[in-house]
């Protein structure tokens, strides 16, 4: 009996060494399982003494530990993803930016001064006309009343509190007058999260509390954003950087400040949650919002990819975090007109940070020097290395989670598969309905469900997204050719090329403006079609009429889109309400451009 036990030990020893050298994790797990079973059998037979047993278990533990360490190391190792970025096809500036922004491991690589081409017109061209509209209705009385009574009762949110909270959020998002991180971005991300939950069918996997957590997290995810990056906070030793010890500085602030609002009784929208629900929601919201810190991007992708390869189910908080993260970087998956506007708004925000850095004598952060930033190139990099992999992972994850639900529901004729009579909101006490709520449109009298699992078409969802992302990338490639020209030609010789690039970008901006912003009186108000595209993936490129489809086909988006249609008066460039007259920004941009040309 001792001999057999020693054999087991030897086997364990050799595999443990083999593992540490070779590292075939999957095989190792199988082997380890076999060995443990063998030990169990020997135990059952009484065929092993205590000393051997102890030795064997210790070996098994050491192998397990080795597997664990290696797996953890692999998970933490983002070098695989980053190695592609080192390819020569990606300009140095873009590589530096990707490496320094989307990982925690690499510091900012110093850029060489000779590699800063003059490229200064983009912002001015863009300032001339970006209009998206407001997130919330200003008239507070309309907020709650737009919802059917059952919905309000179901979610237990006191309407006056919701109104006060939404107004406070609006104020916080407008505090720093950011071109990009303003209340429209918050509305856009919230709507996109909502869209993803419905169109992937993932809402049938989530409980009502989790759905609330998703929407809430999206709404607060950039609350009181300062318009500057975490790195800027750290470099300038800002109060928040000190408060949060340089760790996810902004993200910590967004959640903390939003929760602080709810400490006021009249803004406490979670007042009616039970203690347990309140805690669960808070834990989910914290995890989700902290996961929007882009420096954790590669790690998040890697961990989730790894999870998908396992046979076990997907962790809910991780899946929800991925949805929020994807929604947060989703504008490249929307029509070119929208994507271009969002990008330029973000660039302006970055450039304003660059202005501050210059004034403080700090080195420019990547993409923050308005005179040299390669916008088109950076967007190609952003799409290639960040957006595409994220959406590919998102759709794969949704598939893994939702396909079994669809199969199960189709077999059992579950309510989530769309039997109208079973989809009443009145059925929330039923366990099945709690787990897989099916929301109804306010207009259908509660007899019909649009968002059952039966209507989920993940293939179209994925194809549509990927098509739009690719098309946007192609547009940037066209612009990058000009950009490259400007970069390569010497300073004196650039005038002509720069003018042509300026002209091309100006042309692009004017074209977009003309397409989207011409009110009947010649003023620059966004028409409905563009407004609706802000909040939907439904928009194939060059199909402007599709926006109509969004309103009609997607009643679950009705409340937000209605609110947006009726208040189309906020300028995303400064987060302030805008009225339908020629904007001050337009005038300012024209003046700046004229000054630039004269210089
Ligand atoms: P935030 O909205 O806080 O979280 C997601 C981040 O992605 C966003 O801030 C930007 O820093 C970054 N991001 C979004 N869109 C782009 C883009 N088009 N180019 C570069 N970075 C982007
Ligand atoms: Mg953020
Ligand atoms: Zn954001």
Image (spheres, rainbow, N blue to C red):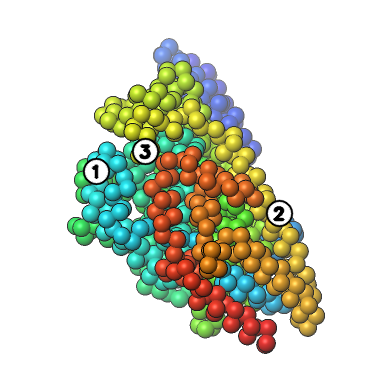
| Relative to 107, 288 lies left or right | left
Dividing the image into 4 quarters, which one contains the C terminus?
bottom right
Q: Position of residue 85 (x, y in %)?
A: 67, 56
Q: Nearer the viewer, residue 18 or 475?
A: 475
Mark nearer the N terminus (3 vs 1): 1
Q: Position of residue 582 (x, y in %)?
A: 51, 73
Residue at 50% from the left image edge and 69% from the top image edge: 573
The answer to whether 267 is drawn above or below residue 37 in the figure is below
Q: Position of residue 273 (x, y in %)?
A: 23, 44
Residue at 54% from the left image edge and 79% from the top image edge: 588
Q: Is mark 3 within 8 Å of ligand 3?
A: no
| Nearest-to-viewer mark from 3 and 1 | 3
Q: Is mark 2 within 8 Å of ligand 1?
A: no
Number of residues whose C-alpha sits closer than 10 Å to that of mark 1, classed few (under 14), some (14–19) or many (20 or more): some
| Relative to 595, 437 lies left or right | left
- Residue occupied by mark 3: 443
- Residue occupied by mark 1: 156
As drawn, the label of residue 474 is: 2
Q: Secondary structure at mark 2?
A: helix
């Amino acid at each position: 009996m001792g001999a057999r036990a020693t054999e087991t030990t030897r086997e364990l020893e050799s595999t443990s060494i083999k593992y540490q050298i070779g590292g075939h994790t999957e095989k190792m797990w199988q082997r380890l399982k076999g060995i443990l079973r063998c030990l169990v059998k020997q135990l059952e037979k009484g065929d092993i003494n205590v000393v051997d047993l102890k030795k064997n278990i210790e070996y098994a533990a050491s192998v397990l530990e080795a597997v664990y360490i290696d797996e953890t190391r692999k998970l933490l190792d983002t070098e695989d993803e980053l190695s592609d970025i080192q390819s020569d096809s990606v300009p140095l500036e873009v590589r530096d930016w990707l490496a320094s922004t989307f990982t925690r491991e690499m510091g900012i690589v110093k850029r060489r001064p000779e590699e800063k081409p003059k490229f200064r017109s983009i912002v001015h061209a863009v300032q001339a006309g970006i209009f998206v509209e407001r997130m919330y209705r200003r008239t507070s009385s309309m907020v709650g009343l737009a919802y059917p009574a059952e919905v309000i009762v179901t979610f237990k949110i006191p309407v006056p509190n919701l109104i006060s909270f939404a107004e406070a959020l609006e104020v916080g998002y407008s505090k720093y007058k950011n071109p990009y991180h303003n209340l429209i971005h918050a509305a856009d991300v919230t709507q996109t999260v909502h869209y993803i939950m419905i169109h992937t069918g993932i809402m049938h996997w989530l409980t009502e509390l989790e759905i609330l957590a998703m929407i809430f997290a999206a709404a607060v995810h950039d609350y009181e954003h300062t318009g500057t990056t975490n790195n800027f906070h750290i470099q300038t030793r800002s109060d928040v950087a000190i408060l949060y010890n340089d760790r996810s500085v902004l993200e910590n602030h967004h959640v903390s400040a939003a929760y602080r609002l709810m400490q006021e009784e009249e803004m406490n929208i979670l007042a009616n949650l039970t203690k347990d629900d309140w805690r669960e929601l808070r834990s989910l919201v914290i995890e989700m919002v902290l996961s929007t810190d882009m420096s954790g991007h590669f790690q998040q992708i890697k961990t989730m990819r790894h999870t998908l390869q396992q046979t076990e189910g997907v962790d809910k908080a991780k899946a929800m975090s991925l949805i929020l993260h994807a929604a947060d970087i989703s504008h490249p998956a929307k029509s070119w007109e929208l994507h271009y506007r969002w990008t330029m708004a973000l660039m302006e925000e970055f450039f304003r940070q660059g202005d501050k850095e210059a004034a403080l004598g700090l080195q420019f952060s990547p993409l923050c020097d308005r005179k040299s930033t390669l916008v088109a190139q950076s967007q190609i990099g952003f799409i290639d290395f960040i957006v595409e992999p994220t959406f590919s992972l998102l759709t794969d994850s949704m598939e893994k989670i939702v396909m079994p639900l669809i199969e199960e529901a189709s077999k059992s004729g579950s309510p989530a598969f769309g039997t109208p009579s079973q989809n009443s909101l009145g059925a929330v006490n039923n366990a099945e309905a709690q787990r897989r709520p099916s929301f109804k449109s306010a207009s259908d009298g509660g007899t019909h469900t649009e968002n059952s699992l039966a209507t989920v078409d993940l293939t179209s969802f994925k194809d549509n997204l990927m098509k739009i992302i690719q098309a946007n990338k192609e547009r940037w490639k066209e612009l990058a050719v000009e950009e490259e020209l400007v970069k390569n030609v010497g300073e004196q010789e650039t005038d002509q090329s720069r003018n042509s690039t300026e002209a091309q970008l100006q042309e692009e901006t004017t074209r977009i403006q003309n397409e989207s912003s011409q009110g009947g009186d010649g003023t620059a108000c966004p028409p409905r079609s563009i407004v609706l595209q802000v909040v939907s993936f439904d928009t194939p490129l060059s199909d402007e009429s599709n926006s109509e489809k969004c309103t009609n086909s997607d009643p679950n988006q009705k409340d937000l889109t209605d609110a947006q249609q009726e208040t189309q008066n906020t300028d995303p460039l400064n987060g302030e309400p805008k009225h339908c007259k020629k904007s001050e920004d337009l005038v300012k941009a024209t003046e700046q451009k004229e000054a630039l040309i004269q210089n």
